[in-house]
Image: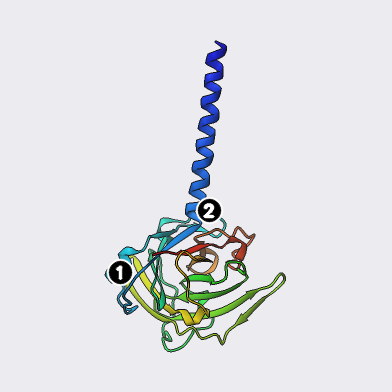
Amino acid sequence: MKTFIIFNLALVFLSLSVSNLSAQKKSEMTNKIKIAHIEKDFLISELNNKSWKKAKEISIENYWSGKRAEVGRHAKAKLLWSDAAFYIRFEANQTEPLVVSDAPNLKSKTLGLWDRDVCEIFVAPNADEPRKYYEFEIAPTGEWIDLAIHQLPNRRETNFDYNSGIQSAARIETNKIVMAIKIGWKAFGKTPQVNEIWKGNLFRCIGAGDARGYLSWQATKTETPNFHVPEAFGEFQFIK
């Protein structure tokens, strides 16, 4: 009987250990994106270019708080890199009225774009300085904005004159929107090395008024919706 009890306890401890290792591995997997490299660049307007198939699909299905969002608000992102540029593509469910401009500006950045339907990426090129990062937004209309951010302890400095040379494309389909941006490495002041890790996060804003939703890849878990939380950034690893 004693041997049986000891054996059962050993099984319990083994099960707990495996479970903890599995949870740890899952956590590591869900906060890191391995970004595939492409040899040949392509136009960002090619939203269905075959190169996108090389990218891992990243789910954006939870609100900033960590609570799961409605399926009609879910989005997916794909990231690619070449020797010349960073590619980001969003595909999002759209089962509610769009909140977009009636007269979109596609020639220059659109201030206040964050008040409409958008998908966003924050990118910190220096992993040891995540409080210095870049913000890029893309709307279903193809409108965009690029900003350089320095998040200080009690305030945020934003360079609205930052010019990344961003290129954008978008398409509105039935119950779905597809958006993509392409940014040359000059915009970040450096080109990533193979296996180098940058920091960042992915977001989606959808809806208006009290029903507006703020989704994020990595939950920021602030009291009220706030994406500017470098401590919550995940990892972007550039692989070949």
Query: Residue, x 33% and y 65% (percent of image)?
Result: 175
Q: Which amino acid type is marked by label 2?
A: Lys
Compared to residue 162, the image places residue 174 above or below, namely: above
Q: Residue at x 56, y 23 (%)?
A: 9
Query: Mark 1 and mark 2: span between their CA atoms?
Result: 33 Å
**Which mark identifies residue 51?**
1
The image quadrant that residue 99 belongs to is: bottom left
Residue lying at the far top in this picture: please name it: 1
Question: Camera-side residue: 217 or 234?
Answer: 234
To which quarter of the image does residue 153 belong? bottom right
Which residue is found at the position 46% from the left and 72% from the top?
117
First in sequence: mark 1 vs mark 2: 1
Label 1 secondary element:
helix
**Quadrant into which the N terminus falls:** top right
Q: Secondary structure at mark 2?
A: loop
Number of numbered discs present? 2
Q: Is 105 or 48 nearer to us in this picture?
A: 48
Where residue 147 sits in the image (x, y, percent)? 55, 80
Which residue is the extreme one toward the front?
194
Q: Residue at x 49, y 47 (%)?
A: 25
Circle 1 crowding by C-alpha within 10 Å: few under 14, some 14–19, many from 20 = some
Q: Amino acid at mark 1?
A: Ser
Camera-near label (1 vs 2) is 1
Which residue is most to the right? 154
Give the label on residue 67, or none. 2
Q: Position of residue 45 (x, y in %)?
A: 32, 78
Q: Position of residue 39 (x, y in %)?
A: 33, 73
- In screen coordinates, is 126 left or right of 60? right
Q: In the visual, does 139 lie left or right of 6?
A: left
| Quadrant position of residue 167 | bottom left
**At which x and y percent is residue 83?**
40, 76
